[in-house]
Image (tube, rainbow, N blue to C red):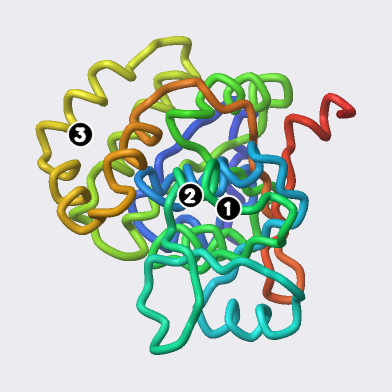
Amino acid sequence: MSQQSPPLPQNKIIIALDRSEAVTWRGRGIVIDLFRFSNTICARVESGRRDVRVYPSPAMALAARRLIRDADLFSEIDLGPGVDRYDNSPYTALYGSDPSRPALSATNSGSPAAASLLLAEEILVACFANFPALVAYCLADPKPTLIVPACLFYDSRHVEDMICARALAEEFEGRDAFPQALEEIHASGRVLDFLSTRPETGKRDMELALRKGFMKAVPRIKFTAGAGIVEDAAKLKGGG
């Protein structure tokens, strides 16, 4: 009879290095897709949207949009001719769209990363913008935590996710690694890569993605019947 592994301590923080770690994780999972998904989800919640949903695939999001009246679809994926959608833009989510309308999200990396954590006790979304709020929420209720860089689910060259994940692990230990992380992200060339493909809102998106602590939302995703329903865990905990 094989021995079971001892339970992880409540304050244990691990950074996933492979997709399989997320799929089998049962503690708290934190998804980081820095340039788009994480900031866009945070921005929607921060803007006051009450109906925010995440879908593992574009097909599921499109099917849901046909059923949900007046829903906005956010995706950086080419969904074919005639599909009305917003780009997966944090700036648009925060300042350029109607917060009274339902928001549906299907993305290359963030959505699949979140959906991989179906066994997790809790799924949160992190970015530099909500570091202080998210860390305060987690430290008030410690759980074994897996930080999932979303690049594992799409393109490992998107190193900003891993850099942000390492900075978040440092933040949990009370150390501010943001300045070093920012320097590393700029040195990687990824900012210029992003700006070259996002002529309309790229500069404003990047200004939001690379600011620390200006959003208070702590998005929590609960998957039900294929849809990830997003709520603000910080407000729910505070009773607001």
Q: Amino acid at mark 1?
A: Ser
Q: Position of residue 56 (x, y in %)?
A: 54, 72
Q: Please identify, in this view, whether the residue under mark 3 or under mark 2 is nearer the observer.
A: 2
Residue pointed to by mark 3 = 185
Answer whether labels 2 and 1 touch (C-beta < 8 Å).
yes
* Residue visible at 61% across and 29% down in the picture: 9
Residue pointed to by mark 1 = 97
Q: Amino acid at mark 3?
A: Ile
Q: Residues within 10 Å of mark 3 (few under 14, many from 20)?
A: some
Q: Earlier in the sequence, mark 3 or mark 2?
A: 2
Residue 47 falls in image quadrant: top right
Residue 163 falls in image quadrant: top left
Question: Looking at the rendered structure, which numbered label has been put on residue 92?
Answer: 2
Q: Position of residue 74 (x, y in %)?
A: 51, 64
SS class, disc 3: helix
Q: Which quadrant of the figure contains the C terminus?
A: top right
* Residue visible at 83% across and 35% down in the picture: 236
Please count the marks in the image: 3
Residue extending furthest toward the bottom: 81
Q: Is residue 161 above or below residue 55?
A: above
* Residue visible at 39% across and 54% down in the picture: 150
Q: Is residue 173 left or right of residue 185?
A: right
Q: Position of residue 151 (x, y in %)?
A: 32, 55
Question: Looking at the rendered structure, which numbered label has been put on residue 13?
Answer: none
SS class, disc 1: loop
